[in-house]
């Protein structure tokens, strides 16, 4: 369920592209320190965005230094230095990756080997953040039950994942959490679940896996489903975007919000349009701007 939260690159300032890449690389290193080197393979764009958002809301400045990358030891690139937020997000990334692989096993009966590689990292993350691990486990159990029952309501199906991200935001923000931060993170989580399901529509039909859009509309292909129900599907996503935009107006940010505004207000709608037309591609952070 990862990789969809991306900036709208044509409208991304160079300074924000630099910050985004620095956060990504810093988070990668932090995962290695906290959860082991293998766990670094689970790093996602979504968690880089989460790191940027949490730093801003908690008034925690990001310190950037040029360091060498394990993937290219001859190049020094800007990296965000480790701090409490980054360490927590690193563990959350590992916890969520482990459960994503568990979901793959349940859906497609594959991925056991991949999950085995993350088991040690998962145990380390769980030991460092047992409450966060409990949140993920409980909400994913709710999600599995709804999927097992073939839930045909998009809102109901996406609810556990949205609540999980909202609960994790409360956990990370502590005293900085408000009803609007919770609603924002809920909306982001709901969108991630639904956009992933929409993107997997044809694959899930072929493999006879659960998919909320298939259960709700029962069309044999995504194109046929959208041809008949595009207005309704558009409304579902636009409702999320409208709620997210309203929440942003009521959240206190301490630093420049150009990066997170770009992702929430432009990047998420852009990814939605690309998934709907079948042209969504995952872009590497190192390609967002030249070094």
Image: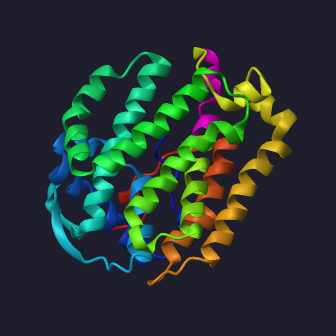
Q: Position of residue 156 (x, y in %)?
A: 67, 38
Q: Is residue 35 magenta?
A: no
In the rendered view, would you say 219 is above or below 186? Answer: above
Compared across the picture, whether 263 is left or right of 54 comes to: right
Magenta-colored span: 196-206
Give the image quarter of residue 112.
top left
Q: Position of residue 120 (x, y in %)?
A: 18, 35
Q: Position of residue 94 (x, y in %)?
A: 30, 44
Q: In front here: 256 or 10? A: 256
Q: Is residue 205 magenta?
A: yes
Q: In front here: 165 or 179? A: 179
Colour convention of the picture: rainbow
Q: Residue at x 45, y 68 (%)?
A: 53
In the rendered view, would you say 282 is above or below 149? Answer: below
Q: Residue at x 68, y 71 (%)?
A: 246
Q: In front here: 249 or 136? A: 136
Give the image quarter of residue 72.
bottom left
Is residue 145 at least partly visible in the picture?
yes
In the rendered view, would you say 100 is above or below 130? Answer: above
Q: Residue at x 44, y 26 (%)?
A: 104
Q: In front here: 139 or 95? A: 139
Q: Exactly how many numbered labels are in the figure? A: 0
Give the image quarter of residue 225.
top right
Q: Main secondary structure of the magenta part?
A: helix
Is residue 71 at least partly visible in the picture?
no
Q: Residue at x 51, y 78 (%)?
A: 257
Compared across the picture, whether 133 is left or right of 120 comes to: right
Q: Position of residue 196 (x, y in %)?
A: 57, 39
Image quarter in which the C terminus is found: bottom left
């Amino acid at each position: 369920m990862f990789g969809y939260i991306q900036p709208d690159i044509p409208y991304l300032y160079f300074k924000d592209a630099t910050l985004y890449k620095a956060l990504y690389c810093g988070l990668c290193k932090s995962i290695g320190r906290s959860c082991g080197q293998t766990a670094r393979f689970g790093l996602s764009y979504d968690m880089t965005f989460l790191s940027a958002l949490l730093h801003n809301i908690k008034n925690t400045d990001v310190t950037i230094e040029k360091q060498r990358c394990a993937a290219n030891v001859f190049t020094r690139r800007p990296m965000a230095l480790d701090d409490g937020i980054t360490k927590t997000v690193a563990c959350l990334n590992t916890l969520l990756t482990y459960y994503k692989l568990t979901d793959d096993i349940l859906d497609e009966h594959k991925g056991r080997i991949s999950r085995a590689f993350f088991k040690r990292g998962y145990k380390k993350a769980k030991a460092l953040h047992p409450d966060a691990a409990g949140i993920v486990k409980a909400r994913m159990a709710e999600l599995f039950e709804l999927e097992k029952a073939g839930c045909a309501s998009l809102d109901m199906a996406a609810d556990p994942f949205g609540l999980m991200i909202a609960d994790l935001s409360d956990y990370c923000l502590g005293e900085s959490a408000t009803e609007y931060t919770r609603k924002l993170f809920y909306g982001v989580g709901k969108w991630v679940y639904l956009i992933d399901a929409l993107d997997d529509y044809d694959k899930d039909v072929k493999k006879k896996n659960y998919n909320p859009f298939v259960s709700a509309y029962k069309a044999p292909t995504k194109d046929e489903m959208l041809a008949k129900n595009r207005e309704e599907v558009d409304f579902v996503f636009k409702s999320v975007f409208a709620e997210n935009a309203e929440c942003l107006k009521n959240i206190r940010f301490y630093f420049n919000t150009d990066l997170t505004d770009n992702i929430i207000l432009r990047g998420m709608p852009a990814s939605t349009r690309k998934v709907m037309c079948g042209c969504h591609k995952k872009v590497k952070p190192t390609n967002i701007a030249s070094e």
